[in-house]
Structures are given as structure tokens and as C-alpha cells.
Amino acid sequence: PLGDPTTLHRLLVLPEQLFDRGFQNSASKQSALAQEDALAIAILQYCPIRRKNLFSIHLDHNLHRPGDGRVFLVFEEDEVKNSRRIEFELPGHVVGMIDRHLQTRSPRLCPAGTPWLFARRDGSGSADANYFCTKVKQRIQKEIGLTINMHLFRHIAAQIWLHYNPGQYEVVKRLLGHSALSQTLNVYAGFEAGTSAKLFAEVIEAARRR
């Protein structure tokens, strides 16, 4: 379904739409839950990390703010599956969503001062991954009618990149944190076959015109 540009666009704009809608009634718990789901989807779109890392984001340890307005999402070697450090610079609008959510989530979702971005309701630790994955999956299904689990965002990231950049598997390897290029090729080779054929046809047509 995400091969259809209109469907893909609906997914890509969902986080901001959902987040802004939540602020229309910011006093309710349901609004806070919508903002929380929107934030998870937004982060996964720009940072295709594994779900374990998503739901363990610690505000002090994993969100680095060098003081110039930029914010980086960082996981050290001992926090990731293949022991390779991960770092993403978050887009400004995602940073804004994080800051707005942190300002308004307590006490509706967790106690003030809770140090995790996605936390258990009593603030005792990071969110339960199974519960949260089900919640976000149901949210996407309700909003745009697609069944998308958390891990699928990693495949979506590869699909989008390869569609616009056929053959650039090394970038996908680094983006997803694969330890070997062969791992990336085994999973994603052929994702951009249609795009490659279209580009080649355009080259042939250009050559004919010349």
C-alpha cells in the first residue's frame, strides 16, 4: 500500500496532525495519549530505530542538547543490538513536539520529573514495549486504515530511501545499523526495482531524442 504516494503521504503527515489535534483539548488524558502516539510515530519516521530503543529513550542520557538549538538522539554501543553507536539529529518540528509534550504530559500520563520520554504511568521506568506497540499500531489503524507495527518503520525507511536513491544500500546499512552490507542486501535488494527500471527507460528515451 505504501507504494501509493497518496497513502504514503497520509502516513508521513499523521504525526503532526495527530499531535496538533491532541492540543485542541489538552486537558484530557486521551489528548495526552494521542500526543504520545504521534511522538512515537514521528521519531520512527526520522530515526528508524528498534522498538526496544524507542521505548527506552531517557531524557538526559539519550537526548543530547549541545546548546545551539540542535537535539540528537544517541544510543551507545551497549544499548543497541549489534553494538554500533547510533546517532540521529532530530528535525526541529520533532524537537518542538517533544518539548511541548513534556510540558503538558504530567500528571495525566506520569508524575512530574519522570526521566523517560515514554514512561510507565507510575513513572517507575520506561514504557512496556508490548503495550506501547499495540497502542500505536491500533492508533495508525484507526487513523489511516493501515496495519503497521513498530518494526515495519525500518522497512519503510529503506523503501523510501531506495525509491529515491536506487542502489544506495550502504546508506540503508548505516541508517538501520546493520553490521554487514550483505545483511542489508539480503533483505532489501529489489525494493527499488521498479524505480530503477523507470530511470533506465528515461535514460533510453533521452538517448533516443539526442
Image (cartoon, rainbow, N blue to C red):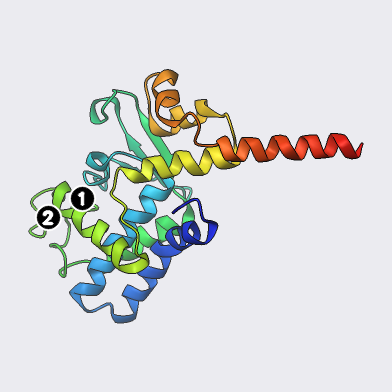
Residue 164: mark in rendering: none
Judge whether 204 appears above or below 16 on screen: above
Q: Position of residue 13 (x, y in %)?
A: 46, 62
Looking at this view, is 130 or 20 the one in front? 130
Q: Is residue 106 visible?
A: yes
In the image shown, does 90 or 9 lie closer to the viewer? 9
Q: Could you tell me if the residues under marks 1 and 2 are in contact, i.e. CB atoms within 8 Å? A: yes
Residue plotted at (37% across, 46% down): 153
Compared to 17, does 2 lie above or below? above
Residue 9 shown left or right of residue 194 in the figure: left
For residue 66, say whether it is visible.
no
In the rendered view, tell whether residue 210 sits above or below residue 124.
Answer: above
**Residue type for callout 2:** Arg
Quarter the C terminus occupies: top right
Q: Nearer the viewer, residue 147 or 101?
A: 147
**What secondary structure is found at the residue carrying circle 1?**
loop
Residue at 44% x, 27% y: name it: 173
Binning the other alpha carbons within 10 Å of mark 2 as few (below 14), some (14 to 19) or many (20 upward) gives some
Q: CA distance from mark 1 to mark 2?
A: 9 Å
Residue highlighted by disc 1: 116
Q: Residue at x 63, y 35 (%)?
A: 196
Q: Image quadrant for the N terminus? A: bottom left
Q: Position of residue 142 (x, y in %)?
A: 29, 67
Residue hosting label 2? 120
Q: Amino acid at mark 1?
A: Trp
SS category of the residue bearing label 2: loop
| Image quadrant assignment for residue 79 | top left
Q: Is residue 182 left or right of residue 138?
A: right
